[in-house]
Image (cartoon, grey):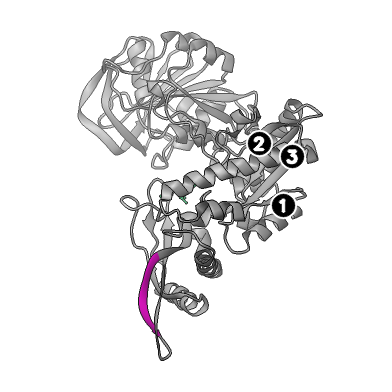
């Protein structure tokens, strides 16, 4: 739920727009991103304490340059334009923006001319390292604006209106390379907009619980699908806190989980006070997967079967009106939003399509949060480290790590090998330092020798990658000793495996999963 005080970030398509919102939230002030195509009425209805115009790839003179109504500057709400946002402000208010003959990209030295407002607390006798990324620059300030700072290539690296609370900076305060970034944003949010640092995860939890209590009528029930991962667990806990056992969490065992996982998830839920409906549908899933080798076909079958099982279970419960989902903010924000609110809303999660079929209304308590904020809530709610920092695990489970057909025997081999990988990664402390680490069963048999016998058995591959967001990834340079232990243990302890290989491919061009 949105708190009263909020900063609105209008997105003009910059790669770092999300970072702006995160930085503001780190200051304990709530912030939301909207596409720059949002109407003036919507902006008014949002009642922002301040507005930030993001950067963007366009030039104000491009025929299709994204813009905003100039009335925005007369709302009486403080506005801070960043990079393109500053140029647009200058352009709309009568200044002159021109192509710079030198692109300024990367670090620059900023000299501050005025240590008030945006630059309160800075030292005018020194320069500061800031990060720039622009082709155009402001040649003539709009009437009634003054320069606040300069850099070698930008005579007006920061500006403000003489009377109105309108500000612009050519550099990017949201990126870590700008050493005064946090200070500048804090000056804007607290000093200029008058916000208070009250948006904490604790207050978020309280407000969310209150909101859910108000939303769900006393006779209504809510279902949610648990995976054991952090998003669905936190979602379930918040809803449970609000309406108790009128929340019915459903945990479906699809037969594709890791060794000991169903038991672990159930005991975790029990320790959290959630009474879970456990559905063991493994045989149904495995039967449908029989003979299937195509990865996308596997995904499709698993997705459909999941919805089927979940729907049956929800109908059995009766009186279910709501589905709670752990959708996060990055799933919701429309990217490249200056082209309009079109783009990529992921209808991910295994229950895609279910709300429409069962006419369920959605509760998505995390839809305003970033992943690290969810982790903070998880800590606040007392979830163990193993859950807070659990590595991502794909919905289709081990099926997409068994190349070729999924059979009981192949599941057994992969489960055992994977359990050894996880155990050793945890033991050595590497588990929490990497994005994902797991075993893959390769559909190839190779010759080996064990004792005096020739063997002809399976190959297991180990995949271990580091990544920020799974869009790109690199293989982790695990110590040889650890790799040796993994290989020895898997070959010695997992019957049916006589060779272990380590995957040294980065993404792109490879993907993280093998299927
Ligand atoms: P790739 O293999 O595309 O994986 O580099 C990127 C991230 O997504 C996860 N992944 C999936 N998650 N359903 C999921 O819920 C899927 O079908 C799926 N495929 C890949 C993968 O584990 C990695 O974190």
Q: Quadrant of the N terminus?
A: top right
Q: Which residues are magenta?
A: 443-449
Question: Cβ(mark 3) to ligand 1 < 8 Å?
Answer: no
Specify whether 241 is left or right of 476: right
Badge 2 vs badge 3, beta-carbon distance below 8 Å: no
Q: Secondary structure at mark 2?
A: strand
In the picture of the structure, the residue carrying the numbered disc 2 is 324
Q: What residue is drawn where x is 64% and y is 37%?
A: 200
In the picture of the structure, the residue carrying the numbered disc 3 is 316
Across and down, in percent, residue 141 comes to 32, 15
Q: What residue is drawn where x is 23% and y is 19%?
A: 98
Frontmost residue, 107 versus 460: 460
Measured in 3D between alpha carbons, the distance from the residue under mark 1 to the one under mark 3, in whole angstroms, is 21 Å
Question: Cβ(mark 2) to ligand 1 < 8 Å?
Answer: no
Specify whether 48 is left or right of 268: left
Local crowd at mark 1 within 10 Å, few (<14), some, or many (≥20)? some
Frontmost residue, 74 versus 340: 340
**Which-is-in-front pick, marks 1 and 3?**
3
Local crowd at mark 3 within 10 Å, few (<14), some, or many (≥20)? few
Specify whether 212 is left or right of 44: right
Mark 1 or mark 2, which is nearer the start of the sequence? 1
Eyeballing the image, is 81 above or below 247? Answer: above
Q: What residue is drawn where x is 32% and y is 14%?
A: 91
Q: Secondary structure at mark 3?
A: helix
Frontmost residue, 338 versus 315: 315
Measured in 3D between alpha carbons, the distance from the residue under mark 2 to the one under mark 1, in whole angstroms, is 16 Å
Q: Is residue 421 magenta?
A: no
Eyeballing the image, is 318 above or below 410? Answer: above
Across and down, in percent, residue 396 comes to 51, 50
In the picture of the structure, the residue carrying the numbered disc 1 is 269
């Amino acid at each position: 739920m949105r708190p009263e005080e909020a900063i609105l970030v209008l997105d003009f398509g910059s790669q770092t727009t999300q970072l702006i919102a995160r930085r503001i939230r780190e200051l304990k002030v709530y912030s939301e991103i909207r596409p720059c195509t949002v109407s003036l009425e919507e902006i008014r209805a949002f009642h922002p304490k301040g507005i930030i115009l993001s950067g963007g790839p366009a030039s104000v003179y491009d025929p299709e340059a994204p813009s905003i109504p100039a009335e925005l500057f007369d709302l009486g709400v403080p506005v801070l334009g960043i990079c393109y946002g500053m140029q647009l402000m200058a352009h709309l208010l009568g200044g002159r923006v021109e192509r710079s003959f030198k692109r300024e990209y990367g670090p620059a030295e900023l000299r501050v001319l005025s240590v008030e407002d945006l630059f309160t607390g800075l030292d005018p006798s020194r320069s500061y390292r800031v990060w720039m990324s622009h082709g155009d620059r402001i040649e003539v300030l709009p009437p009634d604006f003054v320069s606040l700072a300069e850099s070698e290539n930008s005579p007006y690296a920061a500006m403000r209106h003489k009377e109105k609370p309108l500000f612009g900076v050519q550099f990017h305060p949201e990126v870590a390379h700008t050493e005064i970034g946090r200070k500048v944003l804090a000056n804007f949010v607290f000093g200029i907009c008058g916000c208070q640092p009250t948006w904490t995860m604790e207050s978020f939890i309280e407000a969310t619980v209150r909101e859910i209590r108000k939303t769900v009528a006393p006779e209504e029930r809510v279902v949610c699908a648990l995976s054991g991962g952090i998003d669905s667990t936190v979602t379930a806990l918040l809803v449970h806190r609000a309406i108790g056992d009128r929340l019915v969490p459903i945990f479906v065992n699809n037969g594709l989980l890791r060794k000991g996982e169903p038991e672990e998830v159930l005991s975790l839920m029990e320790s959290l006070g959630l009474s879970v409906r456990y559905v063991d549908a493994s045989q149904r899933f495995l039967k449908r997967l029989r003979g299937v080798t195509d990865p996308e076909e596997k995904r499709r079958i698993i997705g459909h079967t999941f919805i089927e099982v979940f729907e049956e279970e929800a109908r059995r419960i009766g009186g279910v009106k709501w589905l709670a989902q752990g959708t996060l903010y990055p799933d919701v924000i429309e990217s490249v939003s200056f082209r309009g609110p079109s783009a990529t809303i992921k209808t991910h999660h295994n229950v895609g399509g279910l709300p429409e079929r069962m006419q369920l209304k959605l509760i998505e308590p995390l839809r305003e949060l970033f992943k690290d904020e969810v982790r903070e809530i998880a800590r606040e709610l007392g979830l163990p480290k193993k859950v807070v920092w659990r590595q991502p695990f794909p919905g289709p489970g081990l099926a997409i790590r068994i190349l070729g057909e999924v059979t009981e025997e192949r599941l057994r081999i992969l489960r055992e090998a994977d359990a050894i990988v996880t155990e050793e990664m945890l033991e050595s402390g590497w588990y929490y330092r990497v994005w994902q680490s797991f075993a893959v069963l390769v559909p190839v048999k190779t010759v080996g020798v064990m004792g005096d016998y020739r063997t002809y058995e399976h190959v297991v591959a180990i995949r271990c990658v580091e990544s920020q967001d799974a869009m790109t990834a690199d293989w982790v340079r695990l110590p040889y000793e650890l790799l040796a232990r993994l290989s020895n243990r898997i070959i010695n302890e997992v019957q049916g495996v006589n060779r272990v290989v380590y995957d040294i491919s980065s993404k792109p061009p490879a993907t993280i999963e093998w299927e």
